[in-house]
Amino acid sequence: MKLFRTGLNTGLLALMLAWPAAFAQDGVQVGQMSPLRKIVPAGTLEPQAAAQYAQTLSKAKQQNALAAENDPQLQRLRAIAKRIIPFALPWNARAKDWKWEVNLLGSKQVNAYCMPGGKIAFYTGILTTLRMTDDEIAMVMGHEIAHALREHGAERAGKATIANIFVKGAEIFAAAKGYDPNVAGQLAGGAANMTMLKFSRDDETEADIVGLDIAARAGYDPRAGIVLWQKMGMVNKNAPPQWLSTHPSGSSRIEEIRRHLPEVMPLYAKAKSAQLSALPPYQPNVKGISPVTYP
Ligand SMILES: [Zn+2]
C-alpha cells in the first residue's frame, strides 16, 4: 500500500512537472508578459521608481500633505494591501523581494498608482470623491499592483525606446531622400504613439483582469469593479479625474469585468468560505447605481 502510494505520488509529480499549466486552472488566464519589457530590465526601473517615490513623499511631507502613520485612512489602505500582497507574489518572481510601501497623499486628484517595485500611493481625492468601499479600494489597488507585477512600466519604456529608434530612422531616411526630416519624423512619431496607445489599452485590460484575480483571492468582491467604473463615470461628467486620463473608461471596461466574473467569483466565494450561489448582491453605497448580482 505504501509502495503504491509512493508510486502514485511520483506519477502525479511527473504529471505536474510535465503540464504545470493543467494544475493552475483556477483564476484568470493571461498570456506571457511582453518581451518588450526586457529592453529596459526591471532591475533598472525599480531603483529609479524607489528614488522618485521617496522624492514624492518628502515633497508631500514638506507641504504637510503626507498622511501620518496613525491616519485612519492610511491604516485602512495598508490593511487592504496587507491582505492583497500575498496573492500578488505568485505573479512575478521579483515581487517577494520588493520593499512594498503604501502611502496616502493629501490631494483632490482622483488618482492612485503602484510603481515598479511595489511603491503604492493613493490620493485622498480618489477615496473621498468616489466614497470608496474597501472592496472598491481593493479593485483599484489590485489593478495598480497588476501593472507593476506584469512590468507594464518596463514594457512602456521599451516601446518608447523603439519609438525613438523609429523616429530617428525616419528622419535619416527622409534626409537621404531629400524630404523635410522634421515632418517625416513627426509622422513616424505619431504612428508610434498610436501603437503605444493601443498597447497600453491591452495593458489596462490585463491589469483589470489580474487585479480582479488578486483582490478576489484576498476576499474582496470582484463585482465592486463594476460599481467602481460606474462611479468613475458619474464623477467624469463634471471634471475628468486624473486616473481617468490614463485609464480610459466606458462600458467596454465594465463588460470586460463582467465577462471575467465566472473566473474570479469562485475565488472570492472560496476566500469568504461561502457557496457561490449564497453570496448576497454587491450593494453600492451611492444612489443611482444598482446592486450587482451574480450570476
Ligand atoms: Zn491602469
Image: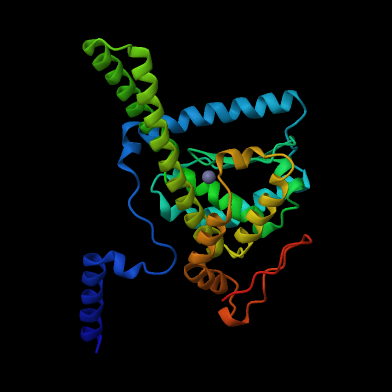
Q: Nearer the viewer, residue 82 or 217?
A: 217
In the rendered image, the vertical position of residue 222 relative to residue 231, given as above or below? below
Q: Residue at (53%, 61%) from the top-left corner?
A: 255
Q: Residue at (32%, 38%) from the top-left corner?
A: 36
Residue 41 in the figure: left or right of residue 209: left
Can you give x and y, in whole percent of width and height, for residue 73 in the image?
75, 47
In the rendered image, the vertical position of residue 173 relative to residue 194, given as above or below? above
Q: Residue at (49%, 71%) from the top-left corner?
A: 262
Q: Nearer the viewer, residue 7 or 210?
A: 210
Can you give x and y, in whole percent of width and height, for residue 274 in the image?
59, 78
Quick one: quadrant of the N terminus? bottom left
Residue 272 in the figure: left or right of residue 46: right
Residue 275 visible? The answer is no
Q: Nearer the viewer, residue 234 or 208?
A: 234
For residue 191, which quarter of the picture? Answer: top left
Can you give x and y, in whole percent of width and height, for residue 86 in the image?
51, 56
For residue 289, which quarter of the picture? Answer: bottom right
For residue 111, which quarter of the picture? Answer: top right
In the rendered image, the vertical position of residue 8 relative to residue 289, given as above or below? below
Residue 254 in the figure: left or right of residue 9: right
Coloring applied to the structure: rainbow
Q: Nearer the viewer, residue 204 or 60?
A: 204
In the rendered image, the vertical position of residue 171 relative to residue 270, given as above or below? above
Can you give x and y, in whole percent of width and height, for residue 139 in the image?
59, 55
Q: Residue at (27%, 20%) from the top-left corner?
A: 169
Number of marks in the rendered image: 0
